[in-house]
Image (spheres, helix red, strand yellow):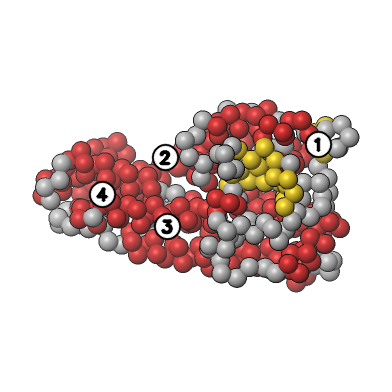
């Protein structure tokens, strides 16, 4: 186990920061996963013992210092089977485990709903790509959306129309269909700008904006020294929103030229993949923090302050590659000082026994964040 000071943990890249994992063991809550130099899994645990700094620990060491929930063991097994480890692949693994019911029936229902919505968003995104291509050859979307038509019928007509487009531009139909399928999969987490239903990341950026405004209002009214932590989280959120909005703008500009699907699909796909990936990494972990804050807003003052302390502990640090301005060591120490004053332990370190109330709270938040 290694301890990094707050100043040492100003990651240069998203990979160095690691990807947030929605564990239900309280001390592993939102631990960040990354690979060491030997490509072995290690986890970054913020304020592991209530003090300052980031603890780095390999997975094999965790069960020896704490009791790990069944959900977390199953989730780690699922993560080990993944070929790549990104916010999107980790989210998919977490939802699959959650859907089994191991975190409770409500969390399972929320996970299944999220998986269904992701599938629907994929179909919608691919459909919009098809309609944009049809415009290039003078076919309107209304021809594919006749009243009373089922989704299956619409998809069948879309494939037929896409085959016509492929013939006109002299591209094999299967190749054209594969291009649309691949691009749709890449764009779906954000969604097309003209989509009637925003993608998850596009919606998450708006939710983060609302959370930032609420935190700023709360910090202005709170009379304790925790208000500084509220300002700190709101500040990080503000930087994240600005960077995310710029990424979203660039992505929408790229998506605004569907002719590239025909004329330069590799470059088109690479640009889309880059923007979506960076936005996904930028917003990684914020869905849980938004759910945590929303759950605390109607609770007593002390509960709200405890939630803000937890937010400040888990707030995703923006890597140097994405943000030119970093916090000074003095700023970080001031935040750590207030955190140490308000931190609450979630586990009895003498026995390693889980705080089951804390586990249940995390399972409830998983339901809201799914």
Mark 4 in CB contact with mark 2 (< 8 angstroms): no
**Which sits earlier in the primary sequence, circle 1 or circle 3?**
3
Horizontal side, residue 98 vs residue 203: left or right: right
Separation of residues labelled 4 and 3 (CA atoms): 21 Å
Q: Please name the residue shown 51% across and 41% down the image.
A: 85
Horizontal side, residue 296 vs residue 88: left or right: right
Asked whether residue 145 is in view, the answer is: no
Residues 130 and 60: in front is 60
Separation of residues labelled 1 and 3 (CA atoms): 40 Å
Separation of residues labelled 4 and 2 (CA atoms): 17 Å
Q: Please name the residue shown 73% across and 30% down the image.
A: 63
Q: Quadrant of residue 216?
A: bottom right
Residues 80 and 361: in front is 80
Tell me the number on the disc at residue 355: 1
Q: Please name the residue shown 28% across and 51% down the image.
A: 266
Tell me the number on the disc at residue 275: 3
Tag 3, which secondary structure?
Answer: helix
Mark 4 in CB contact with mark 3 (< 8 angstroms): no
Asked whether residue 162 is in view, the answer is: yes
Tell me the number on the disc at residue 130: 4
Q: Quadrant of residue 327?
A: bottom right
Separation of residues labelled 1 and 4 (CA atoms): 51 Å
Separation of residues labelled 2 and 1 (CA atoms): 36 Å
Tag 4, which secondary structure?
Answer: helix
């Amino acid at each position: 186990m290694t301890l990094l000071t707050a100043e040492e943990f100003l990651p240069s890249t998203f990979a160095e920061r690691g990807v947030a994992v929605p564990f239900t063991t309280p001390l592993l809550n939102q631990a960040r996963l990354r690979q060491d130099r030997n490509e072995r899994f290690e986890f970054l645990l913020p304020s592991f013992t209530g003090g300052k700094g980031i603890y780095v620990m390999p997975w094999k060491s965790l069960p020896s210092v704490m009791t790990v929930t069944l959900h977390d063991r199953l989730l780690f097994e699922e993560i080990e089977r993944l070929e790549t480890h990104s916010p999107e692949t980790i989210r998919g693994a977490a939802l699959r485990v959650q859907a089994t019911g191991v975190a409770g029936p409500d969390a399972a229902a929320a996970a299944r709903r999220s998986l269904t919505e992701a599938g629907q968003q994929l179909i919608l995104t691919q459909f919009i790509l098809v309609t944009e291509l049809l415009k290039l050859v003078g076919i309107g979307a209304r021809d594919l959306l006749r009243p009373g038509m089922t989704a299956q019928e619409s998809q069948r007509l879309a494939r037929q129309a896409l085959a016509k487009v492929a013939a006109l531009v002299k591209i094999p139909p299967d190749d054209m269909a594969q291009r649309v399928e691949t691009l749709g999969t890449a764009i779906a987490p954000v969604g097309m700008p003209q989509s009637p239903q925003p993608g998850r990341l596009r919606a998450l950026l708006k939710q983060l904006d609302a959370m930032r405004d609420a935190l700023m209002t709360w910090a202005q009214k709170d009379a304790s020294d925790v208000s500084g932590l509220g300002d700190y989280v709101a500040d990080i959120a503000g930087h994240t929103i600005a960077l995310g909005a710029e990424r979203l703008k660039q992505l929408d500009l790229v998506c605004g030229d569907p002719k590239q699907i025909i004329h330069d699909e590799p470059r088109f796909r690479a640009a889309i993949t880059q923007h979506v990936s960076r936005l996904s990494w930028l917003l990684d972990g914020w869905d849980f923090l938004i759910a945590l804050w929303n759950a605390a807003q109607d609770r007593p003052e002390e509960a709200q302050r405890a939630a803000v302390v937890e937010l400040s502990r888990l707030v995703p640090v923006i890597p140097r590659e994405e943000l030119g301005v970093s916090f000074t060591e003095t700023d970080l120490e001031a935040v750590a000082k207030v955190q140490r004053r308000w931190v609450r332990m979630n586990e009895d370190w003498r026995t390693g026994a889980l705080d089951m109330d804390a586990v249940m709270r995390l399972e409830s938040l998983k339901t809201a964040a799914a």
